[in-house]
Image (cartoon, grey):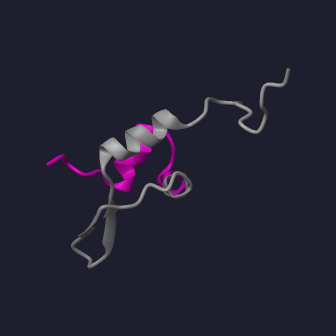
Amino acid sequence: MTTLWTIAEVAAHLGIKPGSARGTLSRWKVRAVDRQIDGHGRAHALYDPEEVREAAAARPGRGARTDLTDRP
């Protein structure tokens, strides 16, 4: 099985802050596949790295206007 990513690892892969990564994953409809309980009893979401990579690859480029269509 593939090693799952914490939100910190997802954020590092995307080049953004962990708080931003949570919102980004939510918009992309990427859900946590498991939870990990730390030493303080807090649950941390774990994400499938392949799903994160696929969602990141499918996003439009910077400044892409996805609301426009080609007109004759």
- Identify the residue at horizontal 71%, vertical 36% (top origin): 66
Left or right: residue 67 versus residue 72 is left
Vertical relation: 57 (above or below) 5: above
- Identify the residue at horizontal 76%, vertical 39% (top origin): 67
Vertical relation: 40 (above or below) 11: below
- Identify the residue at horizontal 56%, vertical 55% (top origin): 27
Q: Position of residue 47 (x, y in %)?
A: 33, 54
Q: Which residues are magenta?
A: 1-21
Residue placed furthest toward the front: 72
Residue in the foreground of this view, choosing between 38 and 25: 25
Left or right: residue 52 versus residue 49 is right
Left or right: residue 18 versus residue 49 is right
Q: Position of residue 5 (x, y in %)?
A: 30, 50
Vertical relation: 26 (above or below) 1: below
Q: Position of residue 6 (x, y in %)?
A: 32, 55
Residue placed furthest toward the bottom: 41
Is 43 a magenta residue? no
Q: Position of residue 62 (x, y in %)?
A: 65, 30
Residue placed furthest toward the top: 72
Is 7 a magenta residue? yes
The quadrant the C terminus occupies is top right
Count the marks. 0
- Identify the residue at horizontal 52%, vertical 57% (top origin): 19
Residue placed furthest toward the right: 72
Vertical relation: 16 (above or below) 46: above
